[in-house]
Image (cartoon, rainbow, N blue to C red):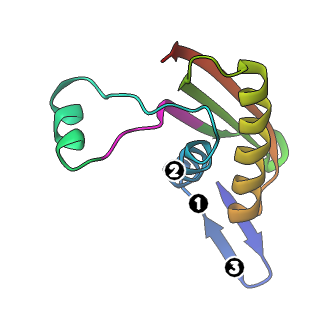
Amino acid sequence: MLITTELGTIGISNRAVEAIAENAAATCIGVRGTDTPGLQGKLLSLVGIKQQCLSVSAQSVESGALQIDLHLAVERGVSIRTICQNLKDQVGYEVEKCTGMPVREVNLYIDAIR
């Protein structure tokens, strides 16, 4: 993803945008950490790191806007609709604030309730 200014061009990798989105999702109430399977999960748990999102995908769509897809586990007993609205607002705001690029849509997929 490229941003062109009068001083030059700024490149922002998809992984950087995904990290911003994942960190923003982690701050939302009702999002539960999930364990990563396999050796990677064991290593992450040894150092105390839990992934908040099962997966995050960011891509540039028409006119430089972003589309972000998050696969999440949410907390049992909390309104999924409320969690999703908060997530969309928070993730969109943080990504726009950090990158300066408009977020066209944030798609959420609830893969687990814990």
Which residue appears at 78% of the width and 53% of the height?
A: 93
| Residue 77 image offset from top left, x and y in percent | 63, 17
78 vs 64, left or right, is left
Which residue appears at 59% of the width and 60% of the height?
A: 12
Give the magenta range. 49-57
Q: Is residue 33 above or below residue 111?
A: below
Task: Locate residue 29: give its quadrant.
Answer: top right
Q: Earlier in the sequence, mark 3 or mark 2?
A: 3
56 vs 87, left or right, is left
Q: Nearer the viewer, residue 40 or 60?
A: 40
| Residue 55 image offset from top left, x and y in percent | 48, 30
Q: Which residue is mark 3?
A: 8
Q: Which residue is mark 1?
A: 12
Amino acid at the residue labelled 2: Ala
Residue 19: which numbered mark, if any? 2
Q: Secondary structure at mark 3?
A: strand
Q: Nearer the viewer, residue 103 or 93?
A: 93
63 vs 31, left or right, is right
Q: CA distance from mark 3 to mark 2?
A: 24 Å
Query: Tag 1: Cα neighbours inside 10 Å, few (<14), some, or many (≥20)?
Result: few
Q: CA distance from mark 1 to mark 3?
A: 13 Å
The image quadrant where one finds the N terminus is: bottom right
Question: From where the camera sits, is residue 61 visible?
Answer: no
Q: Secondary structure at mark 1?
A: loop
Q: Nearer the viewer, residue 107 or 111?
A: 111
Residue 52 belongs to magenta span: yes
Outermost residue toward the front? Answer: 77
Which of label 2 and label 1 is nearer to you? 2
Residue 104 belongs to magenta span: no
